[in-house]
Each structure stands twice: as C-alpha cells, then as structure tokens.
Image (cartoon, helix red, strand yellow):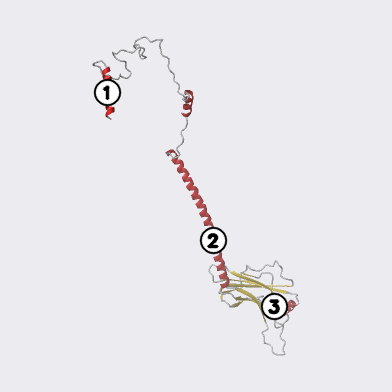
Amino acid sequence: MWQLGLLLAAGIATGAAALPPGQVSQPPAPGSADQGGPKPAGRADDQKPATHDQRGTEVPTLVVGMPNAPDRKEETESVRHTGFEKPLPNWWGPEWAIVWATLILAAVALFQLGMFLVQLRYMRAGMNDAMTAAHAAKASADILAAGQRARIQVIPTWETDVPPGQYGYGFVPPAPQFKFGSRMDNYGQMPAANLKNRIGYYLSASDMPDNFAFDDDVPPMSEAGVLGTKQFLLGPHAPPDRYITAAEMEQMRKEELRLYLFGWVRYFDRFPGTLERVTKFCYRVRVTGNPDIPVVFIPHRQHNYAD
C-alpha cells in the first residue's frame, strides 16, 4: 500500500510542475468553448457567430440507419389497424351481472319445473294406489256384506180344497182343486226389512212366449215389516180368487194346458246405504198324476234373478 501512495504523490507533483505559474488545471465546461486560451488549429467546433448570414450553407440532415429497425410505413399501418380493435369483453364485469343472474334464474326455473313434473308423477301414482286401495276396500266390504246380508229365496207352494184324512177307508175323495202360492225364505245372516211381494200366473194352451211382459212395475200384493234370518213367510195365492179345477189339472197332466207362476220380492238388508234388493222367479207347474206328489215346479228360462 505504501508503494501505491508514493506513486500517486509523484504523479501529482509532475503535473503541477508542467503548468505555468499561477494556473490550476481544471476540466473544461461541457459544451463551452475555451475562454481566453489559444485554440488548436483545425478544431471542428469553430463556428461563426449566430448573426452571420448562413444562407446556402445549411448542413444536410444526417440519416442514420439502424439494422433490424421496423419500416415507418409498416409501423403506421400496424398502428392504424390495431388502434380501432375492440377490447375483449370482461365476462365478469358489472355489465354481465344481469345476464348471469338471468341465466341462473332460468336454470333454477327449469330445475323447479323438473321437480314439479317428478312430484306430479308421484302424486298420480299415489292417486292410482289410493284408488286401488279404495276398490279393494269396497270389494272387501261387498264380500263381507255378501256373506252377512239378508238373502230371500222364493219357492212355489200348492194346496188343495180337500183336507187330508177327511175321508175314511173305503171312501174315494173327490178330485182335488189346487191353489198355488209362494214361500219366501231368508237364508242370509241378517234380517230383511220392508218386504214387498207379488205373484201372478199364466194359464194357456201354449208355452209362455219369449216376449211375455212380466208385471215387475205394478204395486205389491202383500207387505211385511221384518223377516228374520232362517225364517220364512208365505205369500198370496195364484189365482187369488179361485182354484185350478180338477178338469184343468187333468188337462195340464195331458199337456193340453200349461200353467206358469211368476212374481217378485223386494226388500232391504240391514247394511246402511244399500239399495233395495230384489228376487224374481218364474216356474212352470207340471202335474204328475201321483197322489203323493201331485205337482212339481220347473224353473223357467226367463225371469229368475236375485241380486
């Protein structure tokens, strides 16, 4: 280090000795001409004063080319094209908030519509199940009512004008005359109420026609309040005012006459809200000629019905 210090001190002393006495070396001011000192010959910065006429002495403009610099014309075209381009939209800016909100509401509405359709399908399925259950309950109630309700069956009956045992041994009784009627049996599990009954007859040389008009809408011939279970009730006779004579019975045995008994019974069972029940009947009376079983009853192909 001390050698470097000696060298710097020697250099400074040598420079100071080269200057004239009383002058100090200072660096010239930038851009300013040396004031008062001699100017070297041929210096480039010798210029005439500004007041001197310099016409015809203009210095041509120096154009400096730079390698790889863009052409001015191309740059102008590029600026012109790019200066009017629209900026890219800001999808998340305030101006798009209403659009996104509308889309979200539309999506929510579609979702709610889908949920409503699904619920509607389940509701329809539930209604179908409820209807099926209601039908099943009604069928069960009908089955229960069918097993427990009153049921009336009508059986034809007969009687004669000759009491049995009136004539002793060795006496031949006269040929009997007959009357016919109906017997109403309740074979159901409940009493029948408000019974109404009617019986009619058809006596002719020919069979009952298929278009025969049964008197189903005429007033009853007899009425009863209640018919208990496993009990029976006798109805009116047919014909109501006379007997079928012995001669007519013989004609019936020979198939020269034909006798039909028909009628109906209407009643209510004890189940609340049920409609009026009806039983219809029609039988042909056939004479056998056997004194023990003088007649039999054959169901006709029409007018036999029970609900």
Quadrant (top left/top right/bottom left/bottom right) for the N terminus:
top left
Q: Earlier in the sequence, mark 2 or mark 3?
A: 2
| Amino acid type of the residue tagged 3 in the rendering | Val
| Relative to 119, 168 lies left or right | right
Most extreme residue toward the left, as rendered? 22
Counting other residues with Cα less than 10 Å from the Cα at mark 2, is it few (<14), some (14-19), or many (20 or more)?
A: few
How many residues crowd mark 3 within 10 Å: few (<14), some (14–19), many (20+)? some
Q: Which residue is mark 1?
A: 10
Residue 270 in the image: x percent, y percent?
54, 71
Which residue is rendered at x = 54% and y = 58% of the image? 125
54 relative to 167, above or below: above
Residue 56, x across and y down, in percent: 41, 10
**Label 2: which secondary element:** helix
Calculate the distance from the C-alpha at mark 2 to the C-alpha at mark 3.
53 Å
User: Residue 280 lies in what quarter of the image?
Assistant: bottom right
The quadrant holding residue 9 is top left
Residue type at numbered disc 2: Asp
Taking 18 as reference, is 126 above or below it? below
Q: Is residue 247 left or right of residue 124?
A: right
Query: Can you see residue 194?
Result: no
For the residues marked 1 and 3, what is the alpha-carbon distance in whole angstroms?
175 Å
The residue that label 2 is drawn on is 129
Camera-side residue: 146 or 106? 106
- Badge 1 crowding class, 10 Å Cα cut-off, few under 14, some 14 to 19, many 20 or more, is few
- The residue located at (56%, 68%) in the rendering is 140
Q: Of marks 2 and 1, which one's residue comes earlier in the chain?
A: 1
Tag 3 secondary structure? strand
N-term-proximal mark, 1 vs 3: 1
Question: Which residue, given by chain and number where applicable, does mark 3 sit on?
Answer: 296
Q: Position of residue 43 (x, y in %)?
A: 36, 14
Give the image quarter of residue 53: top left
Q: CA distance from mark 2 to mark 1?
A: 122 Å
